[in-house]
């Protein structure tokens, strides 16, 4: 069974959750107004992470995270951004960029999904895309 969509949801949710966690970690003790919104986005990512992981495991598929190097590079980029400008607008811009990249990739994958793809997987991908768009709109309030 082809689980490409599920694997993509898992990887994107994993990296999104990781990025939100890092931003929150670096903003700890600061009074940024965006923190609550980032926590909501992180929690949504967590939900999709869990759903996609559970489905992959139920299909006896190996759950693969992004490489340590990818996460380290992401972490360093986030740290650099927070050090240079930890304003709400800067944090929102950084997270929105990631969301937009994820949306474009997810839209392509949904459009090119074959007819024999599992309808549940396709629905989860569409829900994930809807979440990404909602999160982008939420974070853009801080730009």
Image: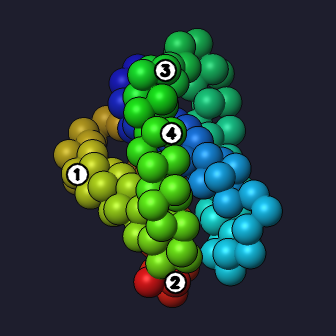
Task: Tell me if residue 63 can be seen.
Answer: yes
**Residue found at x 48% / y 67%:** 85
Label 3 SS? helix
Query: Residue beneath label 1, please?
Result: 108
Task: State the CA–CA distance, disc 4 to disc 3.
Answer: 10 Å
Quarter of the image for the N terminus: give it: top left
Query: Residue beneath label 3, please?
Result: 68
Binning the other alpha carbons within 10 Å of mark 3 as few (below 14), some (14 to 19) or many (20 upward) gives few
Label 1 SS? helix
**Residue found at x 31% / y 35%:** 116
Q: Which mark is residue 119?
A: none
Quarter of the image for the C terminus: give it: bottom left
**Residue found at x 50% / y 39%:** 75
**Residue found at x 65% / y 52%:** 26
Query: Residue beneath label 2, please?
Result: 142
Label 2 SS? loop
Q: Which mark is residue 75?
A: 4
Task: State the CA–CA distance, disc 2 to disc 1.
Answer: 28 Å
Task: State the CA–CA distance, disc 4 to disc 2.
Answer: 22 Å
């Amino acid at each position: 069974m082809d689980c490409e969509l599920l694997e993509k949801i898992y990887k994107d949710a994993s990296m999104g959750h990781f990025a939100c966690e890092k931003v929150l970690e670096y903003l700890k003790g600061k009074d940024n107004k965006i923190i609550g919104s980032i926590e909501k986005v992180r929690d949504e990512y967590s939900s999709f992470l869990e759903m996609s992981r559970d489905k992959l495991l139920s299909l006896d598929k190996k759950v693969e995270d992004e490489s340590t190097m990818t996460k380290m590079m992401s972490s360093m980029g986030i740290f650099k951004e927070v050090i240079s400008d930890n304003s709400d607008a800067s944090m929102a811009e950084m997270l929105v960029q990631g969301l937009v990249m994820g949306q474009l990739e997810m839209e392509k994958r949904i459009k090119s999904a074959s007819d024999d793809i599992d309808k549940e997987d396709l629905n989860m991908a569409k829900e994930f895309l809807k979440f990404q768009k909602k999160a982008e709109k939420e974070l853009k309030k801080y730009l």
